[in-house]
Amino acid sequence: MCQATGCCCPEGLALTSILYKTIAVALMLIMKINFIDKIFAILLFLLGSYIAITAISYGYAQGTSPASGFFPFWMGVLIAGLSIVNFVRSLIGKEHLEEELEIPGLIKSLKIGAALLVFVFTSDYLGMAIGCGLLVLVIGWIIRPEWDRVFASKIIATAILFPIAAYVMFGVYLNVPVPKGILGF
């Protein structure tokens, strides 16, 4: 007896075989890197739009200086705009990805995403400067677990200079409140 249709006729067997082949082809099409790229571009467009729309509720400007929604608004617009460019380039064939999705690359991406989530949830406790510095070091380790002297010096310099530059730009120049953390910076 055929498990899929409940009958014992050859048509049931053929139908089951066609169904399995159809599912297999659909999964192969779905998992193509170009399809994933298009879906990711659409999702990033939606995320960027959400960020920009939400940022407006934080306030765009306070008098002559930017308010807390200024930076997120423009980041959302940038994310959405670049996602549209990526999607259109993929549609018209200007950008064709040759490689397929590989498990090690996917795992690295998930680790970086997890590091970003940990940063978001610990930045109030650690502070923006320390959190950003640690984030740069962790992402550097995820990307390249074994460091040579040149790579280590670049990552360490970035982990020190980027948080300082970001603090001066946002905390001092733009007067945007940044999380201070347990050490006060």
Image (spheres, rainbow, N blue to C red):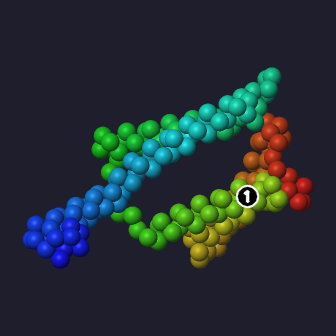
Answer left or right for 34 relative to 19: right
- Compare residues 15 and 171 and report the one nearer the observer: 15
Q: Tell me where residue 39 appears, x and y as whole percent.
A: 41, 49
Which residue is depicted at the point 66% across and 39% down? 72
* Rendering coords of residue 94 (x, y %): 32, 43
Q: Residue placed at 58% from the left, 66% from the top?
A: 111
Q: What element carries label 1?
A: helix
Residue at image position (66%, 67%) is: 138
User: Could you tell me which quadrant the N terminus lies in?
Assistant: bottom left
Q: Which of 160 and 115 is in front in this view?
A: 115
- Relative to 152, is 12 on the left or the right? left
Q: Which amino acid does label 1 sit on?
A: Phe
Q: Which residue is drawn at 62% across and 63% down?
A: 114
Task: Please give the residue where the numbered disc 1 appears in the rendered image.
Answer: 121
Residue 104, position as x, y percentages in the image: 47, 71
- Furthest residue toward top: 63
